[in-house]
């Protein structure tokens, strides 16, 4: 598992996670959340996740609050 911080949330059910030492933020979709609802997340929340290769590049899966 990796750790990061919620950087952006959209009203379309997805967002982006900032990771220490990485320039590009990591995409995540609400269907990849584990143990937390999308509308419970706030910008700045610490999360843990697994890294996967999505159709548009790296993405976060199995996202949960850290």
Image (cartoon, grey):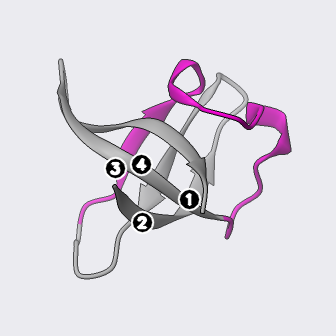
Residues tagged 1 and 2 counted as in contact (Cβ below 8 A) = yes
Q: Earlier in the sequence, mark 3 or mark 1?
A: 3
Seen at 34% across and 50% down, the residue is 26
Instruction: Identify the element where label 3 is drawn.
Output: strand
Question: Could you say which is closer to the camera, residue 7 or residue 41?
Answer: 41
Rendered location of residue 5, percent (x, y): 53, 67
Q: How many marks?
A: 4
Of badges 4 and 3, nearer the viewer stands 4
Q: Are marks 3 and 1 in contact (CB under 8 Å)?
A: no
Please state the horizontal and vertical placement of residue 27, each as a whole percent of the image: 38, 40
What's drawn in magenta, residue-wise? 24-45
Of badges 3 and 1, nearer the viewer stands 1
Q: Which residue is under mark 4? A: 49
* Quarter of the figure with residue 11: top right
Point out the image quarter for the C terminus. bottom right
Instruction: Identify the secondary structure beneath mark 4.
Output: strand
Query: Do the residues under discs 2 and 4 have CB atoms within 8 angstroms?
Result: yes
Instruction: Answer whether labels 4 and 3 touch (C-beta < 8 Å).
Output: yes
User: Residue under circle 1?
Assistant: 47
- Give the mark, 4 or 3, whose residue is nearer the N terminus: 3
Residue at numbered disc 3: 26
Q: Is residue 9 a member of the stretch shown in magenta?
A: no
In the rendered view, tell whether residue 47 sits above or below residue 44.
above
Tag shown at residue 3: 2
Give percent across and percent down for residue 56. 19, 25
Q: Dot 3, crowdedness within 10 Å: few (<14), some or many (≥20)?
A: many
Secondary structure state at the residue bearing disc 1 = strand
Alpha-carbon distance for marks 1 and 4? 7 Å
Residue 25: image quadrant is bottom left
Q: Quadrant of the N terminus?
A: bottom left
Q: Which mark is residue 58?
A: none
């Amino acid at each position: 598992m990796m750790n990061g911080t919620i950087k952006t949330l959209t009203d379309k059910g997805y967002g982006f996670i900032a990771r220490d030492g990485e320039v590009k933020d990591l995409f995540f979709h609400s269907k990849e959340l584990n143990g937390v609802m999308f509308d419970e997340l706030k910008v700045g929340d610490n999360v843990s996740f697994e890294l996967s290769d999505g159709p548009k590049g790296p993405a976060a899966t199995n996202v949960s609050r850290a």
